[in-house]
Image (spheres, rainbow, N blue to C red):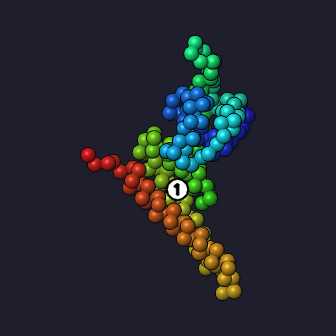
Amino acid sequence: MKSYSPLTIEYALLGFLYQQPWYGYEIHQQLLGNAGVGLVWRVKQSQVYALLNKLEQQGYITAVLETGDAYPPRKILHLTPAGEAAFLDWLQKPVPQARKMRQEFMSKLYFATQITPMIATDLITCQRQKCQAWLATVQEKIASLTAEQRFERALYQFRYGQIEAMLQWLDRCEQELITPIPV
């Protein structure tokens, strides 16, 4: 298999197959829903099939043709060991830029909470550390600005506020998604 790094949406497709074998149509239906990863991604059915074919060509998934009397032949998709390793590696790393929080981190968090609270907790902890590093970098940038650089100061203060909000949100996620619900 060639060296290849899937796109974020492709990791999400691997995440569905990590849970269980699926048909491409079923995965697309999950992405159309108003719950889970369907709240994060909007992808056309043709794009889902194209990405699944690409993942199959790269050796991340395999397809088994299933025939039946009630329906035409269809492929049931399974994750390969390489696909599982790529998915788990992606799942456990924080996103490298703040702009990737909205889709990539949300996708990771969704699958992490589906698998085990420990993976979700570790992901949140790593992402919190990454956000704190971003915050320190922005603070340094603000401190280096001159009085004349008012627009730049406003821009970096905005970024600072965004990162602070991300940190507060990560704290809430940990409380709401990870802490067991009392019975």
Report if residue 87 is visible in the image: no
Q: Position of residue 67 (x, y in %)?
A: 60, 15
Q: Which residue is drawn at 62% across and 78% down?
A: 154
Q: Which residue is drawn at 50% across and 59% down?
A: 128
Q: Which residue lies furthest to the bottom in this view?
A: 147
- For the residue carrying disc 1, how many other residues have a C-alpha within 10 Å: few (<14), some (14-19), or many (20+)? many
Looking at the image, residue 105 lies above or below residue 61: below
Q: Where is residue 162 in the image (x, y as percent from the top left)?
A: 55, 67
Q: Which residue lies furthest to the right in this view?
A: 2
Image quadrant where residue 96 sits: bottom right
Image quadrant where residue 136 sits: bottom right
Q: Which amino acid does label 1 sit on?
A: Gln
Q: Residue at x 41, y 54 (%)?
A: 174
Label 1 sits on residue: 127
Q: Which is more toward the observer, 85 or 79?
A: 79
Q: Which is more toward the observer, 4 or 21?
A: 21
Looking at the image, residue 11 lies above or below residue 62: below
Q: Which is more toward the observer, 134 or 160?
A: 160
Q: Which residue is drawn at 53% across and 33% down?
A: 18
Looking at the image, residue 40 lies above or below residue 133: above
For label 1, the SS is helix
Q: Is 79 displayed left or right of 182 in the figure? A: right
Report if residue 18 is visible in the image: yes
Looking at the image, residue 160 lies above or below residue 143: above
